[in-house]
Amino acid sequence: MSSVVGPGSLAGKRILVAKPGLDGHDSGAKVIALALRDAGAEVIYTGLRKSPAFIVRVAADEDVAAVGLSILSGSHKELAREVLDGLVAAGVGDIPVFVGGAIPPEDAAGLLAAGVKGVFTNDMPLAQMIAELARALA
Amino acid sequence: MSAVPKPGTGQTQPETRVVTPAGIEVPVVVTREMAGDADPGLPAAYPFTRGIFADGYRGRPWTIRQYSGFGSAEESNRRYRFLLDQGQTGLSVALDLPTQCGYDPDDPMARPEIGKVGVSLFSLSEMETLFAGIDMGAISTSFTINGTAAIIYAMYLAAADKQGVPREKLTGTIQNDILKEYVARGTWIFPVRPSLRLIADSILYSNEVSPRFNAISIAGAHVRDAGCTAVEEMAYTLANGLAYVDELIRRGGDLTKFARRLSFFFYVHMDLFEEACKFRAGRRLWAKLLRERYGVTDDKALHFRFGVVCGGSSLVAAQPYNNIVRVAIENMAAVLGGAQSIFTCAYDEAFQIPTEFSAEIALRTQQIVQHESGIAATVDPLGGSYYVEWLTERMEQGMLEVMGEIDAYGGVVKAIEDGWLQRRIAVRAKRKKEETDRGERIVVGQNQFRREAQADSYGEVFRLDPQISARVLAKHAELKRVRDAARVERSLAAVEAAAAADTRNLMPLLIECCHAYATVGEMVDRLKRCWGEFQEPVSL
């Protein structure tokens, strides 16, 4: 395993974990938030049912290093698009966006092509997600 | 059941502790002495360890009830007719998130979600279409609906009125369990206390008007899905059940009468014995709680009737056809536990809306278990097994301990309002994920027994018609154009006034709103004006 894995690999990073749209499945988002905190990140969790506009505003106001969107309702394409466009419009298009949830493999490629920096699904080990995130934010 | 495998061999060391997923250490063998009083008595006799019916499934087989619904009412109506033609015996309606959360389709929050995880039912017009050509008096229908359950129930009654079906003939269930929504499923709308009022209104009204209809299904499935154990799933659910009992008593409900119509809903995971024993333990614990704490003596009021869903989070994306086998095992666990209705997930259900092909396999799985396996030939075939009676007892004790912790905190309503229960489940979910990551829980095809280039594709991909959203929006706009606007406004104003007053039962007023073709979003907005919205505690 690479040296960026483990305690402190995300030290000093402020990360927004967000639940866009109406999807109520928050177990994954909370598990990720707790794991990011264990890795040293300062985590902001939005809670459920936030509009893309709200998520963009929090990301800009809080000057976050990354945004993680958790979506299990099948609306990932529309919601990720709205957040990406919103960040650009707010002048913070450089904040990397990651998407997690129930994402069919063929949709993951589309999300990456649209500008999402990484797609995480629930069968991926937490350590691997943290490592990928740490590399992307290094 | 998990054990630490010897590295590299895949073999279990004989001296290793073996624990169930709920953390109960399992002896190598359970003897007669260890089982204590291993005689669980007779079925249909208090405390109902062996079931609530003397003849088990011989008198009445469990209801095969596949959950489905997507798109607009027209698409779902076609799928329901297909399932009924294939021998399904009850309908289970999945609703889209805008309908569940109380938004009309033209709300900006709703647009990306229209018709995605269930059918859009924004007004009575859609409910009428959903049941076109289906006799509402002849089938039982279950709605997975919570935040807007009272409204959907009102809409169901209004649709029956339109079909000319007497309300007292209606059978089925609305989930209507808001407490667990705050903890796990997330389709809450109003704060906890007014939500409890709305639930009590619908239950008390249903008891009078549609006495064969279950106006609540107190559900553990979603907290289980969110990561808690089988013991916690049952304990949280029984704690929520008692909170509803207390609220209904406070509202002047007749306990013996309403307790007869309380029903429950659970998940079943892969540990066959732990799951079967969870149901046996929960059934007798509920009966004991009602009898010992509330003095209920009527057998029917003590009966713990429950539905089960097999699959979901226990399904695995890797090598997805293996899920067919998992669902069959879970199906058997639910039967061995004595479930009244069962829904088997399709093998692709954790990742997409099932295709007609995968949905049919899920249905056939139940029919094979019911008609070929012999599992339903005699009541509670596991009864009297040393291990089963020992484990049932252990699980019951574990449930009482968890319920005691909630009581010690100040009760389930306070635990939810403070976010205490939510945090507890999040921490449990993370621990479960870490155990799977470390390989302490073997998941075939995912963290063990993988092969290079294994087929992780689930075959046919379900694609929702991209025009559905536009069609739903057009129907919604058309409805608002043609309906009697004055009648809509009158009916909504009456709901708002009664909601503010905190005395009248809101159900007759909501039914009038439905008959006037008021929309779900309009009704919810009026209630929000009176009650506000739930403020989610988000600290982790």
Image (cartoon, coloured by chain):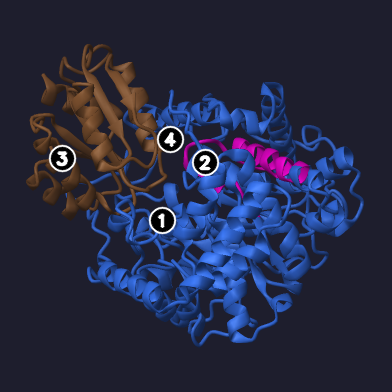
Chain colours: A brown, B blue
Q: Position of residue A98 (x, y in %)?
A: 19, 36
Marks 3 & 2 on one chain: no
Q: Quadrant of residue B262?
A: bottom right
Residue toward you, B429 or B101? B101
- Point out the image quarter for the C terminus of chain B: top left
Task: Give percent across and percent down for residue B208.
Answer: 78, 66
Check residue A86 in the rendering and tell me which mark sits there, or answer none.
3
Q: Which residue is mark 1?
A: B103
Amino acid marked by disc 3: Gly
Quarter-wise, where is residue B153 in the image? Answer: bottom right
Note whether A83 is above or below B49 in the view shown.
above
Residue at the location (58% across, 63% down)?
B342
In the picture of the structure, the residue carrying the numbered disc 4 is B441
The earlier-in-sequence mark between 1 and 2 is 1
For marks 2 and 4, the one nearer the N-term is: 4
Could you tell me which chain the residue with mark 3 belongs to? Answer: A
Which is more foreground, mark 4 or mark 3? 3
Q: Are marks 1 and 3 in contact (CB under 8 Å)?
A: no
Q: Mark 3, residues whose alpha carbon is within 10 Å: few (<14), some, or many (≥20)?
A: some
User: In this rendering, do the residues under marks 1 and 2 share a single chain?
Assistant: yes
Q: Chain of mark 4?
A: B
Front label number (1 vs 4): 1
